[in-house]
Amino acid sequence: MTTLDLTAPSLEVAPRLLGAHLTVRSEEGAVTVRLTEVEAYDGADDPGSHAYRGLTPRTEVMFGPAGRLYVYFTYGMHWCANVVCGQDGRASAVLLRGGEVVEGLELARSRRPAARRDVDLARGPARMAQALGLTGADNGLALAAGGRAELAAPADVVPEPVTGPRVGVAGPGGDGEVFPWRFWLPGEPTVSVYRPGTRRPRRT
């Protein structure tokens, strides 16, 4: 398999990641996921991005270099993983939303005992991180051939992706009207369920 160029903006990188294989190795073994669903986040130009308000200790890894993982904790329960992309100094990342476990199935099952079906092992960003064994300790981890985490380009021809609004993210012009930045492969059962974003009232 060949490697992917991750130095382009997130909106260009995101569809290229579909069909790519992400492998994460540990002492327990290795799990490989074929990516079927991703979301682009564009830093200062994107209210949905963690980096919208600039550089912070949490978002530092998103500002480059490209080719690392941005792993964050959400809802006080789950880890989620992003591929950092774009040019140094400008926050850009792609959230890994869904995928098919193609290697290390037994290990992924042991990490995701609540999954009733194999298609649910990495269906959703938190589930994917859990199946791959990613935690906050992997924030900033480089994607490198033979390393703990490795990203390889698709080996086969990938169908034209479907696009739509991001899950749970409301854009300023209405969900999906301004930010149709979710990309997924058609007909894949590992694509997560869509839920529209909601606006929270401002605190007074």
Image: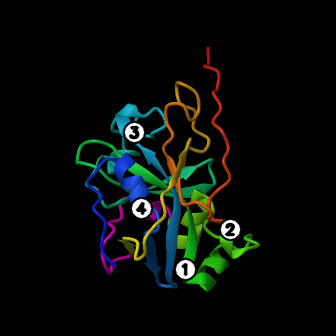
Tell me what residue is drawn at x 30 percent, y 71 percent: 3
Q: What residue type is labelled 4?
A: Leu
What colouring method underlies this structural image?
rainbow
Q: Give the range drawn in magenta.
A: 135-148
Q: Name the residue under label 1.
A: 102
Tell me what residue is drawn at x 49 percent, y 36 percent: 179
Badge 4 element: helix
Q: How far apart are marks 2 and 1 (CA)?
A: 13 Å
Q: Distance between the residues labelled 1 and 4?
A: 16 Å
Position of residue 68 relative to residue 146, above or below, is above
> Badge 4: how crowded within 10 Å, few (<14), some, or many (20+)?
many
Q: How far apart are marks 4 and 3 (CA)?
A: 21 Å
Q: Position of residue 177 (x, y in %)?
A: 54, 31
Position of residue 2 relative to residue 68, above or below, is below
Q: Which of marks 1 and 4 is nearer the N terminus?
A: 4
The label on residue 51 is: 3
Q: Earlier in the sequence, mark 4 or mark 3?
A: 4
